[in-house]
């Protein structure tokens, strides 16, 4: 089946299928397999029955039975992934994260465990509500059928809406993108389609136009997309227990009661608090804008500054009369945002961006702040300005260049008056646009001040404005009391435009100053910078010369297309970061398997900075905050422990909405906090419990058996929020024995080596991939895509090749079944034994890779390498190569083992082979992982690998001889195109000089317990023995050194584990056939040497055509080869 690249494709993937017969053959296997699994309820996981002698679930707990013992007797495995948000179809990125749990679930079933893999649907938060509100506005504009919309109508650019984020979530920004300025770049571009209207987005993902108006009801989304997700996952062959599916929000009253219990318990523990705190806030939505509410800027947090106030003493010469008139005698403060208030003693000037636009804004006490409009908008929501929150009153505009030469009073400054100067790097998107200059400790300030002094005329300033010299503020061991000057000289920074070097210098200066600096001036002289910083800040605030100020670390855009600010608001928040809770979270992380060091490091970094998180909002979908129902629990706070809900969901309700009670007949209102605490917590069931004791105990039994989560798979972008919250809340609500055991994070998924994007056509949904390539080929390619935390790649050429490979494997297995009676039987020969040993080794390695969730390696070992082993066996057994034919038992062992090894990846293919070729009656989902036939013998594996290389080495030696002959470097008359013969010289012992060198290396190794070669000792020994003069010796020594680094002391063991002479002799028929020799002679060097010893050496050599040089050069494992023509 060929694949072609369609460079002109506007939609869909870049790989175009030309022939589909083989794919269609494989797809035809899917429906019967899926029907069989559904009929047999293969994926419905239930706890084991009650232990013998225990009559009821209530008795199980009343009699103190051990659930741990039950789990040992009946091992379980519970895997989850973050439930997808139900505002679109699942795409290939979802499939990639899901595949990690899916493959693991398949493997764990084969280990004999009771496997629980459930799926739920997330609907909490703003995205759906915001999208439905947009749709309502669009229906008002264009009519319910949107017939009023004309594609060729261009809206006025000043009023057109920004592009709508897609309703199918694409990968969020990379965890590696720690530069806040890049916050917008990743996610906004990933989610933007270039389309303006919500109805266009819905049409883009396949919603018929006649259905669009129904999406104006946010709850309609919840009926539309979950069934599609279920269909897509079922079509992929996912091993999901669908009895446990549920929706979040009040749409499911059972889950709603679960969230109520969770939040109440956290509140009772004092982990939910109320008060004013900085939060990212959407003025348009009138509420905090948390990560899942954002169109861009996920994981961006408030950055707190000290806003220092510099009183304007005298306006510069370019300030207009209009500005002065607008001031009207009010006090004006130029306000700068700083992270280093302790350095304010050393202010020598104030910087502005000469091209930036500033404003004079009314603040408190009849005063004006001179700052950027962006900063004013933030301050307006932080109580800094008078009047209602969000009120901004601007009295005048002024350009930065007009402010040059303005005289200001620096707060706490040694210099009492300084001037406003220009700085090229001032940003309107960072701070207030006003920068206070401390050139002693800021490399940027120092270098800019030096530039201005050198080129005052060019910068349009008077030299006296830049006359104040840098003032020492603090001293460090490394850089003294002029750190900025020291580093600018050290790094040879010549200009304020040397951005990279300045960034390096800034980082070095700030770290050294904070951790090792001591104040040399001010009230806190002699104190460390760490101690002095908060004290100086508070002094400035108390003196009315500074105020607290915060802004987003980088731009945040809400789902309603609003540019967010930082607001100081009263809100309910989870007290993440509180010392004792944080310690418990670290303890949980320490006990948890993260599979990759990078994942653990990322968690530790987040735990170290994460602080208070707003857990409620007033807009969107969700469960009401129990004690303050005007608020809704936000989407990342109702999603921390829902994995526990999966364990009992099938008992509570029959459908995902919870409309129909489950088999226990429990109604949602009966699930009170007290009942939940008994089922999931440590509470006693009250006597007046609305749920019967036996039913409550059954719920508790199911939960206690399946919990904790054995592994959670997620994209790495959730580490800064959901996954860390997951750790925190589990640490708060559950005992250690029920803490999550493992988490596995993956990178984003690229398609054909490029970022997935609908606008470029490089995009596939899960359904499209399954339809295009078939479920097994799609799964195969997901397994091949990669397993570490870096971005993975779904390569469509791999999917295409997977179809060919699986189809070919099907045909070969069916062919073997048809000729089964003709295959060899009886005793095993050497090749059969070697094949069996290789299969056993690959079974063992594949098991190890599955256990470590290294699926790409498991695929290589269990499929590619396993096929290579079969191909060699088939080749060496071929009668045309002198073989005896394949052994029937070996052939069908291989088919069985291969089928089982790739079952986690390709269940539909495996089901077909399992039943229709191997004749098994049960379905493949009940099959166990293959076991090795006997302990693996290293000697057989090494012999097998040796045999595979013999012919290639012979051909290489022959080719080298021909090349030498062609270049005139050999006098041989040998012609490889004529009838030819070969002799292989096999050595059983190494050359005597090598054995001596090895012995000397051993004497120089591991002296005084140091496992390395003592070079001085070795050279001394080699000199004493005279071996150092031999040119062959030192290269040989280097070779042994390298082996020691890899193998350790095993490098000294050089004898072969198999009989090389006999191995080559049994290969003679294969060598003759494959390399086209009329005669092949395998001869022992020892035998030749014995003959030469007892006969005339020269005479015998000539008679037998011995090559004495090759005899001398032969070594065990490295035989020499002689060629001649007949």
Image: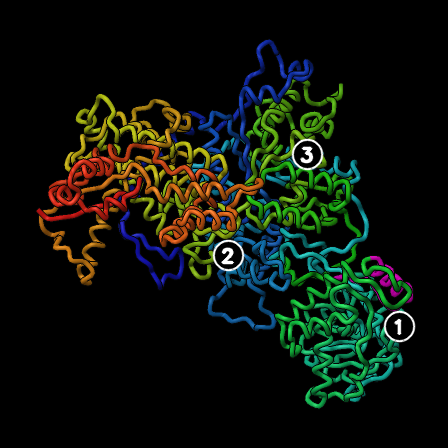
Q: Is 88 situated above or below 305?
A: above
Task: Determine the residue located farthest toward the bottom in the rendered image.
Answer: 457
- Frontmost residue, 438 versus 690: 438
Dot 2 falls on a residue whose secondary structure is helix
The first of marks 2 and 1 along the sequence is 2
Q: Main secondary structure of the magenta part?
A: helix
- Give the distance between the C-alpha atoms of the residues marked 3 and 2, in whole angstroms: 34 Å
Residue visible at 62% across and 14% down?
Answer: 56
In this image, 838 relative to 202: left or right?
Answer: left
In this image, 332 relative to 222: left or right?
Answer: right
Q: Residue 415: x, y in percent?
A: 86, 77
Q: Check residue 533 for magenta coloring.
A: yes
- Give the distance between the C-alpha atoms of the residues marked 2 and 1, in whole angstroms: 49 Å
Q: Check residue 143 for magenta coloring.
A: no
Q: From which residue to which does the magenta span run?
A: 531-550
Mark 2 — residue?
201
Q: Is residue 599 visible?
A: yes
Mark 2 nearby-residue class (10 Å; few <14, some 14–19, many ≥20):
many
The first of marks 3 and 2 along the sequence is 2
Q: Which mark is residue 257?
A: 3
- Frontmost residue, 204 versus 1015: 1015
Q: Is residue 207 visible?
A: no
Mark 3 nearby-residue class (10 Å; few <14, some 14–19, many ≥20):
many
Mark 1 — residue?
366
Mark 1 nearby-residue class (10 Å; few <14, some 14–19, many ≥20):
few
Q: Residue 1114: x, y in percent?
A: 27, 44
The first of marks 3 and 1 along the sequence is 3
Q: Is 651 situated above or below 368?
A: above
């Amino acid at each position: 089946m060929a694949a072609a690249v369609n460079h002109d494709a506007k939609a869909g993937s870049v790989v175009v299928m030309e022939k589909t017969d083989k794919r269609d053959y494989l797809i035809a296997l899917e429906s019967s397999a899926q029907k069989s699994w559904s009929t047999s309820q293969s994926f419905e996981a239930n706890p084991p029955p009650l232990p013998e002698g225990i009559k009821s679930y209530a008795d199980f707990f009343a009699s103190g039975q051990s659930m741990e013992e039950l789990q040992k007797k009946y091992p379980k495995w519970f895997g989850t992934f973050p439930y997808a948000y139900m505002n679109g179809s699942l795409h290939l990125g979802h499939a990639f994260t899901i595949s990690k749990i899916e493959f693991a679930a398949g493997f764990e079933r084969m280990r004999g465990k009771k496997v629980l893999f459930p799926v739920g649907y997330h609907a909490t938060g703003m995205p759906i509500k915001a999208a439905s509100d947009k749709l309502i506005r669009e229906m008002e504009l264009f009519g319910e059928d949107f017939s009023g919309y004309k594609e060729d109508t261009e809206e006025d650019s000043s009023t057109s809406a920004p592009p709508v984020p897609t309703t199918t979530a694409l990968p969020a920004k990379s965890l590696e993108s720690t530069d806040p300025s890049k916050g917008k770049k990743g996610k906004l571009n990933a989610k933007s389609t270039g389309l303006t209207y919500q109805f266009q987005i819905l049409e883009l993902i396949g919603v018929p136009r006649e259905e669009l108006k129904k999406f104006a009801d946010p709850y309609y989304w919840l009926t539309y997309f979950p069934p599609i997700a279920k269909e897509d996952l079922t079509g992929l062959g996912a091993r999901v227990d669908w009895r446990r599916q549920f929706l979040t929000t009040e749409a499911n009253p059972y889950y709603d009661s679960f969230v109520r219990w969770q939040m109440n318990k956290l509140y009772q523990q004092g982990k939910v608090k109320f008060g004013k705190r900085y939060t990212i806030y959407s003025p348009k939505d009138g509420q905090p804008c948390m990560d899942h509410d954002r169109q861009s800027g996920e994981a961006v947090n408030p950055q707190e500054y000290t806003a220092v106030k510099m009183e304007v003493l005298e306006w510069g010469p370019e300030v207009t009369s209009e500005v002065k008139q607008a001031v009207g005698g009010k006090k004006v403060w130029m306000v700068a945002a700083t992270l280093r208030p302790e350095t304010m003693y050393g202010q020598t000037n104030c910087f502005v961006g000469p091209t930036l636009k500033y404003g004079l804004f009314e603040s408190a006490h009849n005063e004006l702040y001179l700052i950027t409009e962006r900063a004013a908008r933030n301050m307006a929501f932080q109580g800094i300005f008078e009047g209602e929150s969000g009120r901004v009153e601007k009295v005048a505009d002024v350009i930065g260049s007009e402010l040059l030469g303005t005289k200001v009073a620096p707060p706490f400054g040694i210099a009492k008056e300084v001037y406003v100067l220009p700085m090229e790097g001032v940003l309107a998107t960072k701070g207030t646009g006003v920068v206070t200059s401390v050139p002693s400790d800021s490399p940027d300030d120092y270098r800019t001040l030096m530039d201005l002094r050198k080129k005052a005329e060019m910068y349009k300033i008077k030299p006296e404005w830049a006359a104040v010299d840098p003032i020492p503020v603090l001293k460090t061991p490394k850089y003294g009391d002029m750190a900025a000057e020291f580093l600018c000289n050290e790094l040879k920074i010549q200009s304020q435009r040397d951005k990279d070097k300045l960034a390096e210098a800034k980082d070095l200066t700030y770290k050294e100053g904070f951790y090792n600096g001591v104040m040399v001036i001010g009230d806190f002289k002699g104190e460390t910078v760490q101690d002095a910083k908060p004290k100086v800040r508070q002094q400035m605030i108390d003196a009315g010369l500074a105020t607290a100020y915060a802004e987003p670390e980088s731009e945040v855009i809400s789902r309603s297309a609003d540019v967010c600010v930082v607001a100081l608001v009263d809100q309910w928040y989870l007290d993440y970061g509180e010392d004792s809770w944080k310690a418990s979270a670290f303890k949980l992380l320490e006990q948890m398997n993260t599979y990759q060091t990078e994942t653990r490091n990322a968690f530790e970094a987040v735990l170290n900075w994460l602080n208070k998180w707003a857990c409620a909002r007033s807009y969107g979908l969700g469960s009401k905050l129990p004690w303050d129902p005007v608020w809704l629990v936000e989407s990342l706070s109702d999603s921390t422990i829902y994995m526990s809900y999966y364990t009992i969901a099938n008992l509570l309700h029959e459908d995902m909405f919870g409309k129909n009670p489950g088999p226990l007949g429990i109604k949602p209102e009966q699930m009170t906090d007290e009942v939940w605490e008994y089922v999931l917590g440590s509470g006693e069931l009250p006597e007046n419990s609305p749920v019967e004791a036996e039913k409550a105990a059954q719920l508790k039994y199911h939960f206690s058996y399946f919990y904790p989560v054995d592994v959670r798979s997620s994209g790495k972008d959730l580490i800064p929020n959901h996954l860390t919250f997951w750790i925190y809340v589990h640490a708060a609500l559950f005992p250690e024995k029920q803490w999550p055991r493992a988490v596995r994070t993956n990178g984003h998924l690229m398609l054909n080596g490029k970022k997935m994007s609908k606008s470029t056509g490089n995009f596939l949904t899960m359904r499209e991939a399954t339809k295009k390539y078939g479920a097994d080929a799609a799964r195969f390619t997901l397994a091949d895509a990669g397993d570490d935390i870096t971005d993975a790649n779904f390569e469509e050429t791999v999917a295409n090749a997977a179809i060919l490979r699986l189809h070919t494997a099907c045909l070969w297995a069916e062919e073997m079944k048809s000729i089964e009676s003709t295959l060899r039987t009886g005793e095993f020969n050497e090749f059969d034994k070697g094949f069996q040993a290789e299969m056993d080794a690959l079974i063992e390695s594949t098991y190890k890779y599955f256990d470590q969730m290294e699926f790409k390696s498991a695929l290589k070992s269990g499929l590619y390498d396993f096929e290579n082993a079969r191909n060699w066996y088939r080749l060496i057994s071929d009668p045309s190569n002198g073989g005896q034919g394949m052994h029937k038992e070996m052939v069908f062992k291989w088919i069985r083992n291969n089928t089982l090894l790739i079952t986690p990846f390709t269940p539909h293919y495996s089901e077909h082979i399992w039943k229709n070729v191997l004749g098994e009656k049960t379905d493949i989902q009940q099959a166990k992982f293959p076991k090795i036939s006997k302990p693996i013998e290293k000697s057989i594996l090494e012999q097998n690998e040796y045999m595979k290389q013999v012919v290639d080495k012979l051909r290489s030696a022959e080719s080298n001889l021909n090349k030498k002959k062609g270049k005139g470097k050999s006098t041989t008359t040998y012609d490889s195109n004529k009838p030819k013969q070969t002799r292989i010289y096999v050595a059983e012992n190494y050359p005597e000089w090598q054995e001596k060198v090895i012995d000397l290396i051993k004497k120089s190794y591991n002296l005084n317990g140091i496992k390395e070669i003592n070079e001085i000792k070795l050279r001394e020994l080699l000199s004493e023995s005279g071996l150092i003069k031999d040119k062959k010796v030192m290269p040989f020594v280097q070779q042994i050194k390298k082996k020691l680094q890899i193998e350790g002391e095993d490098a000294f063991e050089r004898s072969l584990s198999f009989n090389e002479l006999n191995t080559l002799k049994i290969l003679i028929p294969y060598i003759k056939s494959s390399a086209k020799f009329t005669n092949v002679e395998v001869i022992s060097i020892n035998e030749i040497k014995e003959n030469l010893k007892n006969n005339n050496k020269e005479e015998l050599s000539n008679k037998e055509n011995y090559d004495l040089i090759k005899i001398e050069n032969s070594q065990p494992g490295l035989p020499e080869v002689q060629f001649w023509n007949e």
